[in-house]
Image (tube, rainbow, N blue to C red):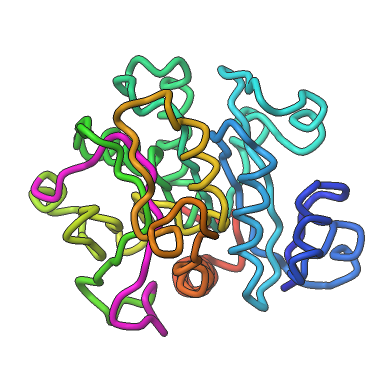
Amino acid sequence: MPLRIPDKLPAIEALKHENIFVMDESRAHAQDIRPLRIVILNLMPLKITTETDLIRVLSNTPLQMEITFMKLKSHTPKNTPIEHMMMFYKDFDELAGMKFDGMIVTGAPVEHLAFEDVTYWPELTQIFTWARSHVTSTMYICWAAQAGLYFHYGIDKHLLEKKMFGVFRQYMTDPLLPIFRGFDDYFYMPHSRHTEVRKEDIAACKELKIIAESPVSGVSMAMARGGRELYIMGHLEYARDTLDKEYRRDLGKRDDVDMPLNYYANDDPDNKPIVRWRAHANLLFNNWVNYYVYQETPYDIDSIR
């Protein structure tokens, strides 16, 4: 797809090796098209990995999109070179006066903290408030989904005894929703979290609709404001080896992390992980961009309210 991303972003070369088409800014400027503006607030510690993961799943629509990466002024990442951040990211202050067709807010490794104890919580909630009037549709992923549900609807997260870790079968509560167009009867979603938002708490909020869930991993997707807010508790954007890297990182260091379920062939960590979620991940992001961003956003982007 004609996905406009900054020249020299490392994800470009990585995805070309995966046979995924992306277009750098230099070539995109030659096309006389109003691209969809998508802003990504990347809170993950491994920024470059997350950039690649998200661009991969955004790459299967014929719509041209212009990707902007947002960073927090109140937080300095420790695992990404400062040169990378300066070259490819912009502070919220620089973007606050702009409107965007879509926004993605990623997870963050801070779920052990109360939301108000996260050092960048004040700036993050400012962005959450801003998104409601400056973005057509916002997708919150994993911890960001929990944070968004807490800030917008007062629904708190709860600590799990054992990490919810693995790839779990999900069932749609309303298969006719556009976000699920083309889906099979069920789909798989990777989960990697130490906390949960309980079904009964979401169900008690009239403004929210549970749209996918699992008998094992619980609520996986919720929607609000007619699709202007989408909350995803897992990680459809994850690459094949992401859970494996997390498992080996924590092996022998934590007693609340078991082997990821339904992930390795024959549930043997010596075997290669099986990808069960990629096709539905591509379809879900394609449906989000088409039906909740492109079909809903005004041509005059400044008229977003």
Q: Is residue 304 above or below residue 108?
A: below
Residue 149 drawn at (x, y percent): 28, 41
| Quadrant of res 22 | bottom right
- Rendered residue at 25%/65% (across/down): 211
Residue 299 drawn at (x, y percent): 60, 68
Answer yes or no: is residue 224 visible.
no
56 displayed left or right of 204: right
Camera-side residue of 177 and 268? 268
264 displayed left or right of 258: right
Residue 100 drawn at (x, y percent): 58, 52
Camera-side residue of 198 and 163? 163
| Quadrant of res 219 | bottom left
Answer yes or no: is residue 202 visible.
yes
Residue 191 drawn at (x, y percent): 37, 50
- Rendered residue at 70%/65% (across/down): 35
Q: Is residue 54 above or below residue 131?
A: below
- Rendered residue at 66%/47% (across/down): 51
Is 182 in the magenta?
A: yes
161 displayed left or right of 67: left
Q: Report the span colored magenta.
A: 179-200
101 displayed left or right of 116: right
